Image: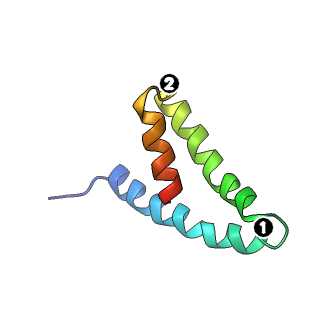
Amino acid sequence: MSLRTPDLLFTAIAPAIWGSTYIVTTQYLPNFSPMTVAMLRALPAGLLLVMIVRQIPTGIWWMRIFILGALN
């Protein structure tokens, strides 16, 4: 089973983005509240997902998103 280049790229991007949260946290947390830092981390990803999917969640999905966000 061979991996294609896009698969390798996506596999490498996810940990790189996840690992960058340490840098963001250490640089901004002393100056901002934890909620502001959490918003700065989550907002770009959320906006990117809305741009890709091109629709806003409806109905029961809002509750699922809220629970997932609270647990995260």
Q: Nearer the viewer, residue 60 or 5?
A: 60
Percent from the top left, x then y, of residue 67? 46, 49
Label 2 element class: loop
- Residue at 72%, 75% in the rendered image: 26
Q: Amino acid at mark 1?
A: Tyr
| Count of numbered badges drawn on the protein | 2
Please give left or right for residue 39 compared with residue 50 in the image.
Answer: right
Percent from the top left, x then y, of residue 44? 63, 46
> Callout 1 environment at 10 Å: few (<14), some (14 to 19), or many (20+)?
some
Percent from the top left, x then y, of residue 28? 78, 67
Q: Is residue 16 above or below residue 55?
A: below
Q: Quadrant of residue 12?
A: bottom left
Q: Is residue 57 above or below residue 15?
A: above
How far is mark 2 from mark 1, CA to CA?
A: 31 Å
Q: Which mark is residue 28?
A: 1
Q: Which mark is residue 55?
A: 2
Please identify the residue farthest to the left as the structure is shown.
1
Percent from the top left, x then y, of residue 14? 46, 59
